[in-house]
Amino acid sequence: MIQILPSISPELGYIAVLFLLFVLPRALQRWRVPAALTALALGAASGLGLGLFQHDTTLHLLSTFGIVALFLFAGLEVELDDLRKHALVLSLHLVLGAALLAAVAMALARLLNLEPRVALLAALALVTPSTGFILDAIGMFGLAPKECEWIKSKAIATELLALLVLFATLQSTTWERMALSSAALAVMIGLLPVAFQVFAKLVVPYAPKSEFAFLLMVAVVCAYVTRQLGVYYLVGAFVVGMAAQRFREKLPALASEELIRAVELFASFFVPFYFFNAGLTLRADDFSVGAVRLGGAFVLVMVPLRLATVVMHRRISLGEGLRASMRIAVPMLPTLVFGLVIAGILRERFAVDGLLFGALVLYTLTVTIIPAVVFRAPLPDGAAPKAPALEGEEA
């Protein structure tokens, strides 16, 4: 850790970070400021303003635990049977989302003179909701349970598509790389049920309540594998969560509500370190006048487009009105985690300039805070408009 004040020991510096990350964000939440944005701002202030914690390996490790736990939690929330049951409605949602993604990517390539892969990744950062963050935040908006269920289903379906596109885009340099990476990922996915079965037979009978530690370590290992494949930690962690959910019948404790809450609690502790560490990577030239203008343009164009896509989908598939549709569309705007991850990939792998990187970060921060502003005074539960039932359910 680089220190401006030599009298401050590294230990005291870490204690100060812990205090700030777990006290200040909670205090600001009374004004609907997302804790993640506060942690990001603290990281930016520490790096840009004070020159502290630059390239700190401890904080990087803690941030890795955070992003792994967050996407493990998102994967555990995926119930394929439910997605399959509502496949018709969600398929139309994905078709419209894919069309929006393609249109945005082509526009970025043309207007900003970006190569196709960079344009597609930037488009992903602009249109993909961050499921883990959204699931953690929607509880504060006073939404009805059915509305929350719709938001969850749509966000998960969109993120599944986005992860597939992310993997394909990053591995598309050559057909050989795509084939080898796909084979490696397939082998990893195929080995997960075997690992779960061995754990259930040989470990659980003699080490009860060890499911949480095992699941977390498997997620860390798989996240590292996908990181080595060049698709970042989130893919491996998400896949482990999905695999654990599918293995639930044979080992219920592996994806029980109690374990999911434990993973959520673990993520809530470590995720602030991810955002703090992300703030440390920001540079002063990322926020030039050009970046601010481009970021503002992204907000002015993309927010209406994304809202209109959800509203149009719900009008076509469910005959829903504008106000009710907006209560689903607005909470799906945040792209915080996905946006920051892809912005980092663009800088690390493709050496994009500060203009695009800064614009994506500014866009991400803006759309993340919009739901908190819109739902600043949430309706009581009884006053919320009734959302249409999911297909196959009673209203």
Image (cartoon, rainbow, N blue to C red):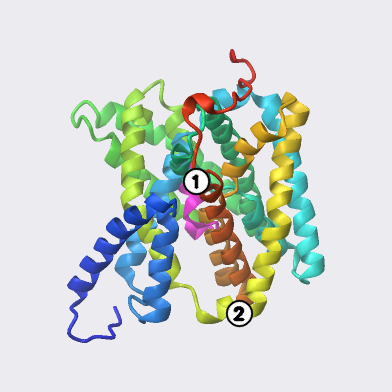
Over which residues does the magenta segment extend?
227-238
Q: Name the chief secondary structure element in magenta.
A: helix
Q: Secondary structure at mark 2?
A: loop
Query: Which numbered tag is attached to residue 288?
Result: 2
Within 10 Å of disc 2 (Cα), the crowding (few <14, some 14-19, many 20+) is: some
Camera-nearest residue between 280 and 308: 308
Is the C-beta separation of discs 2 and 1 under 8 Å?
A: no
Using the image, determine if residue 21 lies above or below residue 98.
below
Kind of residue sitting beneath label 2: Ser
Residue sitting at 52 percent across and 32 percent down? 148
In percent of width and height, residue 310 lies at: 70, 39
Q: Which residue is mark 1?
A: 376
Residue sitting at 53 percent across and 43 percent down? 375
Q: Report the quarter where the C terminus lies.
A: top right
**Marks 2 and 1, how far apart at CA:** 30 Å
- Look at the image and say whether residue 236 sits in the magenta stretch: yes
Camera-nearest residue between 190 and 119: 119
Considering every residue shown, the one lying at the far top of the view is 394
- Residue 114 visible? The answer is yes
Using the image, determine if residue 79 lies above or below residue 17.
above
- Look at the image and say whether residue 206 sits in the magenta stretch: no
Q: Secondary structure at mark 1?
A: loop
Camera-nearest residue between 272 and 30: 30
Q: Across the whole image, how many numbered discs are drawn on residues?
A: 2
- Residue 173 visible? The answer is no
